[in-house]
Image: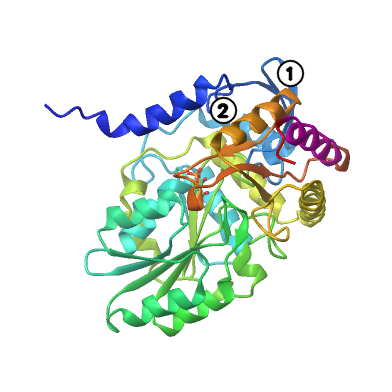
Amino acid sequence: MTDLFSKFDPLIQQREELLSTGVTDPFSLVMEEVKSPTVAICNGKETILLGTYNYMGMTFDEDVIAAGKDALEKYGSGTTGSRVLNGTYQGHKECEEALREFYDMDHAMVFSTGYQANLGIISAIAGKGDYVIIDIDSHASIYDGCAMGNAETVPFRHNDVEALEKRLKRLPADAGKLVVLEGVYSMLGDLAPLKEMVRVSKEAGAMVLVDEAHSMGFIGENGRGVCEEQGVIDDCDFIIGTFSKSVGTVGGFCVSNHPKFDVMRRVCRPYVFTASLPPSVVATAATSIRKLMHGSNKRAHLWENSKTLHGGLKALGFELGTETPQSAIIAVIMPDLAKGAMVWEALLEEGLYVNLAIPPATPAGMTLLRCSLCAEHTSEQVQDILGRFERAGKAVGII
Ligand SMILES: Cc1ncc(COP(=O)(O)O)c(C=O)c1O
């Protein structure tokens, strides 16, 4: 009889090999205490957090916390129901109103996670007989949305405008087409050339969906993302985002100006067939989104942090995922998994947490130490981080 677990053997073996070198397991770290958006206690030690998606540092904002406590007391701990039955409270509507204002768009729909937003919108829009054209480095939720909808998925080379255009030209002129892009690609922290990509997509008669998970709150004059920064927000049919990064809680959303958008509430299965977010979560999200509308000082400081860390790591001799700092993510490329895990552990011993990212999540089989900066990191913390990288990199012998 076939062992249904046998397909996981290579993964189990990879982990066993890694742990047999004596390295601490990089994927089971516990945050024993969280003191602020940038500091936690890990293994009993005060640790600077450089591997969270808390870009704007909203998790400890006092207005956000007060809104959450108030909603918890007034409305209870959960809705125990779907958005389309008993699970839409006043707070969900207010959260959608905050998103409409944030993006200056006609429609907003809140999902329970960003994963579900991609799953729901992509699968509902592009069904059997339609085409979804996606960057090969797309997030898993985009791939899963394509699979769920049963449309023909057409991948193209990462950030390659010509490849996208060629794929689009090969498709039947009258077929339904949805191009799905991301503003910031989270593994290397690089930006998509959205201006050109949106143009060629529109010329081919495709609808365009942009996932701005890693740019909301930070990139663009009003923090609306790379679409705003590159002047194409009005040409995007759907923007997908998450509350689990800059917003600082959990949840997902889609905003759109499409006149028929409201029908999505009836046809997106990951919206209909799951429980809605707890009242405390939508209250924290709405408060955070409204504060992010006035976040220009924080955005400026986060850019400073990103530039200082990128320049400093480069000067130390580390190989980075991008030539210049493009977002709040700076990926440090490791020679291999074993060395990557050693540097990761050496950094943790130094009191610095970063994300170790390994295949298949990474492009081209790379092992990465992904650093994600926060607007609440002080300039001193960033200098400290550079010192810790220098010591860890030298101890392992990669710089
Ligand atoms: C590009 C992208 N889209 C969607 C998601 C899913 O977001 P959530 O954590 O809200 O499910 C992520 C999460 O990492 C992401 O990186």
Q: Residue furthest front?
A: 397
Q: For residue 110: magenta?
A: no
The residue stretch that appears in magenta? 382-395
> SS of the residue at dot 1?
strand
At 82% from the left edge and 41% from the top edge, which residue is drawn? Answer: 382
Quadrant, the N terminus:
top left
Q: Which amino acid type is marked by label 2? A: Pro
Marks 2 and 1, the one that precedes in the sequence: 2
Which sits in the foreground, 98 or 75?
98
Looking at the picture, how far across and down is residue 388, in whole percent? 79, 33
Identify the residue at the far right of this view. Answer: 380
Residue designated by label 2: 26
* Mark 1 residue CB less than 8 A from any atom of ligand 1: no
Q: Please name whichever residue, 206 or 159, is drawn nearer the observer in this view of the structure.
A: 159
Q: Is residue 126 above or below residue 311?
A: below
Q: Quadrant of residue 23?
A: top right
Q: Considering the image in quadrants, where does the C terminus appear?
A: top right
The residue located at (60%, 53%) in the rendering is 188
Going 32% across and 30% down the picture, which residue do you hit?
9
For this view, does 246 lie left or right of residue 394? left
The residue that mark 1 highlights is: 45
Q: Position of residue 74 (x, y in %)?
A: 56, 30
Q: Residues within 10 Å of mark 1 (few under 14, many from 20)?
A: some
Residue nearest the observer in this picture, 289 or 232 = 232
